[in-house]
Amino acid sequence: MTTLIVNGESRSIAASPDTPLLYVLRDELGLCAAKFGCGLGQCGACTVIVDGKAVFSCVTPVMVLEGRTVTTLEGIGSRDAPGPMQRAFIAEQAAQCGYCIPGMMMRAQALLNRDPQATDESIRAELQPHLCRCGTHMRILRAIRRAADEMRPKTVEARTGR
Amino acid sequence: MKLRFVLLALLAIGTFGGTAALLYAWESPIAPIDPRSLGAPDRAVLRRGASLALLGDCATCHTAPDGLPYAGGLAMPTPFGTIYSTNITPDPETGIGRWSEQAFIRALRSGVDREGRHLYPAFPYDHFTRVSDDDAKALYAFFMSLDPAKSSAPPNELAFPLNVRLTLAGWKLLFLRRARFVADPSRDEKWNRGKYLVDGLGHCGACHSPRNLLGAEMKSAGFAGGEAEGWRAYALGRSSLSPVAWDEAALADYLASGSHPLHGTAQGPMANVVDNLSQVDPADVGAMAHYLASLGKGEGRNDAERPASGPGRLPQAAGVQAATPSIPSEPGGAIYATVCASCHDGGRPLPLGGSRLDLSTAVADEKPANLIHLVVRGIPAAAGASAHPIMPGFGDILDNRQISDLVNYLRTRFAGRPQWNGLAKAVAEARGGR
């Protein structure tokens, strides 16, 4: 049996060890934000954060993640209390069909956690593995910029202990 | 009295020797030109120059990431320090705008810039010395026709004495054979064209040959395999370790399209090379393939296993995820079964199915670098190349230990060769260089 820390909680996974993380999240843990897109690690819809890094959950069997920390979109805010990334996407109305958006938010979150000062160029480069056919790319970029702005003062406060 | 005589003699010899060396190493500047004095070049010559620049991969080194083409500034790590490529657009201040044709040709073939300074052999003038007059002139015309870009490369980061350019005269004395290409009359025109391009502008041996302690290609081991930017440049010809022996058709196909079903997809620095070659006259690529094929074949250990090639040959798997085999207890085998097998054993054809690892040179090679790079980075989708194989990278999913376990398993199972030495270090290096 595999044990994972999912959104801060230790979870024992009943699924067989070769099951992709995506299916475990959706089918076993009921966390349905991450989406199945291509199943080949090429579209980004299934992206979640593992130990601080954005990964494609559709090509990641749980076996190789023993004891590691997984964060899904549900872990950075909820419908009632959206986090800064989610508030920014709502404010910019960055979703059209929305299927690809949870994956994009997770990769953007991982980037900003690592580099709160991320430039527009590094945001564009980072989001390269993600496909969106609706065409809200400019809104998505604006939303990530807005999230970065909103998240930054908090980091400063945290650093100065206020 | 005697001692004083000896000292004086030594001083005299030293002064004489030093002066002689200085005279030997000294190259005179070539007078600057006014770039506006150049007449309008012939369009056919320009087209040929553009094609030759692609065959020589000039832009690949003379362009910084996200920089203007040919404006230089790319950092090139070497065992001796970091060298930055120069601006070869015709900007008068920071590029080659004041270089005469003569100065350009001297730089190309002898590695001396217009001011008379020796150039580092990261610029492969040991190959370009073979370039014909006509081709050198076409290249000059092409570069001088580019839009001038104002851009200065950062200073090189080299330790003493290598930062003294005069020392390069000694390197050249040892390793540079200034000689134009001479056709072999016993061979046909296609072979000679191929050899001219492969050994000259194409400078294939610069990566595909091992280098000695002074960074010069070991001529006795030409094409025996080398390194480029942390990637292995595989051995070619008779020393090739490819499980399926290369033939002329496969070489031509691979060089022109960047991928071949039995040999995989060009990645790392070779991806730039095939991208360039995809834009030149296919007859030139065909000639290079023809010459390279004439260098002989490797053992082709798995030739008997060679599947009938052609897309769509393998049965289409029923679903996206094929059933994974039972999970072995050894860690590497378990990772293969759960992470890799659904594509590589899934029966789905290329490009969306995995290639056959028993045919992979990355698994069969003497060094693990390329296999590690492929596991870590995958094979990114190439722009405008929808039929190319793709693979997600697993560098953010697997830790170093897991990658080592997997690579060892692949090596033993699919190449049937002993495990690589120094694997842990190689994995750490490949990660660092990402």
Image (cartoon, grey):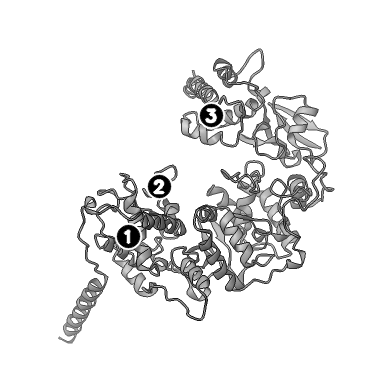
**Which chain's residue wears label 3?**
A
Mark 1 falls on what kind of element?
A: loop
Tell us which disc is closer to us: 2 or 3.
2
Tag 2: residue type?
A: Pro
Image coordinates of residue B115 in percent, x first then y, are: 24, 60
Mark 2, residues whose alpha carbon is within 10 Å: few (<14), some, or many (≥20)? many
**CA–CA distance in space, label 2 to label 1:** 27 Å
Tag 3: residue type?
A: Leu
Whether residue B265 is visible here, answered yes or no, is no
- Above or below for B272 versus A82: below
The residue that disc 2 covers is B69
Whether residue A78 is visible here, answered yes or no, is yes
The residue that disc 1 covers is B163
Mark 2 falls on what kind of element?
A: loop
Tag 1: residue type?
A: Asn
Q: Residue at x 44, y 42 (%)?
A: B66
Q: Residue furthest top?
A: A80
Confirm whether circles 2 and 3 share one chain: no
**Which chain's residue wears label 2?**
B
- Above or below for A1 versus A80: below
Image coordinates of residue B250 in percent, x first then y, are: 63, 62
Q: Earlier in the sequence, mark 2 or mark 1?
A: 2
